[in-house]
Image (spheres, grey):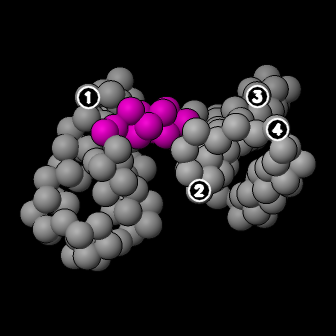
Amino acid sequence: MHDFHQAEDIVQNVFLSFWKDRNSIEINESVRAYLFRSVHNRCLDALKHREVILRHNFRSNADNPSCTEETWETFVEAELYIILLKAMDKLPAECRKVFRYSRIDLLSHKEIAEKLGLSVKTVENQIGKALRILREALKDYLPAWLMIF
């Protein structure tokens, strides 16, 4: 998501829902993990909603070529992002964590190693493993995926 205000709204809504439902929520893992997963799911919902709006706009603006091209690019970007997030969710837990620190948080291999108590070589191996798995999972989208990463 590139919309900072929408991301803030999502986080705030998750906390609000959590507070309202605090007496009826059953948490089987840590509260942190529960909240992280809730925000993640709400972000996916927002992206899916955005995709629906973009499809509608694309159909509505089919007569305007410049608007259609811009809407199409935004739609493709949002769809690829959803596909990438789903593929990342299928990575092994440690591999996913290392990959997120590297590609999303933009930490160096050394910083990741220190943060997780791993060797730099292990971090490099985990990132390589993640890239191999993601390349396979995204092979149908690889040309567009390479432009993003």
* Region rendered in magenta: 80-92
Indicate the quadrant where residue 109 lies.
Answer: bottom left
Q: Position of residue 126 (x, y in %)?
A: 20, 51
Q: Quadrant of residue 59?
A: top right
Query: Which disc number belongs to residue 38?
Result: none
Residue that badge 2 annotates:
32
Magenta stretch, main secondary structure, is helix
Per the model, the C-alpha gap separating discs 3 and 4 is: 32 Å
Q: Position of residue 63 (x, y in %)?
A: 81, 27
Most foreground residue, 133 or 31: 31
Q: Residues within 10 Å of mark 4 (few under 14, many from 20)?
A: few
Labels 4, 2: front one: 4
Q: Which residue is mark 3?
A: 52
Q: Specify the amino acid type for callout 3.
A: Val
Query: From this viewpoint, is residue 70 visible?
Result: no
Q: Nearer the viewer, mark 2 or mark 1?
A: 2
Q: Is residue 34 magenta?
A: no
Residue type, label 1 = Glu
Residue 49 visible at all: yes
Q: Secondary structure at mark 3?
A: helix
* Residue at image mark 4: 24
Question: Which residue type carries mark 2?
Answer: Arg
Give the label on residue 136, or none. Answer: 1
Task: Return the disc, 4 or 2, that comes first in the chain's sequence.
Answer: 4
Q: Taking 32 as reference, is 131 above or below it?
A: above
Question: Is the residue marked by circle 1 packed among few (<14), some (14-19), or many (20+) residues within 10 Å?
Answer: few
Regarding mark 2 in the picture, which secondary structure is present there?
helix
Q: Is residue 111 above or below residue 37?
A: below
Mark 3 neighbour density, 10 Å: few (under 14) some (14–19) many (20 or more): few
- CA gap, disc 2 and disc 1: 31 Å
* For residue 34, side relative to residue 19 (left or right): left
Q: CA distance from mark 3 to mark 1?
A: 27 Å
